[in-house]
Image (cartoon, rainbow, N blue to C red):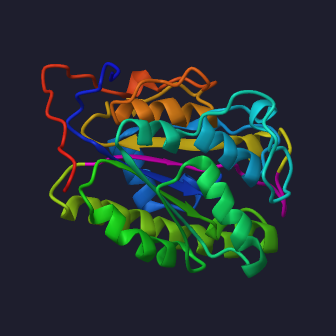
Amino acid sequence: MHADIGSSPVRRVVLVVLDGLRPDAIPRFHLHNVAGFARRGASTFRAQTVSPSITPCAMASLLTGAAPERHGVQSERFHLPRPRGPVHPLATELRRHSLSSSFFMPRVPFLMRGIASRISTLLGLGEFRNHGRDAHEVLDAARVALESNRPGLVAMHWLDADRAGHEFGWMSPEYLQAISNADRCVGHVLEACAQTGRPRNVLLLSDHGGHGRSHGTDCDEDMNIPWIMHGPNIKPGPIDPTLCLYDACPTLAHLLGVPRAREWDGRAAMEAILVDSSSPHAWPAEP
């Protein structure tokens, strides 16, 4: 049984994670595509990641809707965690409602590919690909999925800003170059979605910020993240700055017409979602 927006006319959602993007970098470095995306959609630049503000912990919360204390990932170690409570990945819930899920990220080291595959299976991802190094190459790998009209979720994880931050420092010239590259790719994502002839809802956010050459603390530079939504089901304007990273699961599920799983800690960003129960035109699944 579907939630309020279960009959949503848009059954294709795109998630873009710009790893390490600080919200204040968007206006400071004139990120044209991200800023334009925020102006035309619903956004806050003061949403929060989870603590500790590190990528494994944040991505686990993003994809399971669970706080770190429950999903069990609380360090930089690349491993299969032992959950401390019930965990229900978003992709698993989508599959129960006959919706696909695809996840694209940069290439992982050879020795970690086996565990990466096991983690993707644990998360219930229908398609998982690690390809290339930068946002452009990940986007190329995801292009077929982006252009497909099959109902479901396409997620991309871009590491450009995070790598530059660790190597050269957050807000450095090299960091600017990296996030400018990612900003161009945001433009390409919007173009790819427009070319399909079918509308998409898009959620763009980061998993954490950074300061100096690191992150992981509870300071604002590490914890504050952008949260930007755009699409036919999105109401333009500012949204609640108290949104947390694990609110993405119920938000994405709601946009796809799937009810909130009881195991999720977060809530859907309802203030940014248009509900039109008078237009029940869900897309049929492709044969």
> Relative to the observer, which residue lies in front, 11 or 267?
11
Q: Which residues are magenta?
A: 200-215
* Image spot of residue 173 (x, y percent): 68, 74
Magenta span has 89?
no
Q: Residue at x 37, y 36 (%)?
A: 97
Q: Determine the main secondary structure of the stretch shown in magenta.
A: loop
How many numbered circles are shown?
A: 0
Q: Residue at x 57, y 76 (%)?
A: 134
On the question of residue 172 being in view, the answer is: no
In the visual, does 248 lie left or right of 153?
A: right
Q: Residue at x 80, y 44 (%)?
A: 73
Q: Quadrant of residue 256?
A: top left
Above or below residue 80? Residue 167 is below
* Image spot of residue 250 (x, y percent): 49, 29
Above or below residue 222? Residue 186 is below
* Image spot of residue 5 (x, y percent): 29, 25
Magenta span has 204?
yes
Quadrant of the rendering where the N terminus is positioned: top left
On the question of residue 143 being in view, the answer is: yes
Quadrant of the rendering where the C terminus is positioned: bottom left
In the visual, does 7 lie left or right of 171?
A: left
* Image spot of residue 192 (x, y percent): 29, 65
In the visual, does 226 lie left or right of 33?
A: right
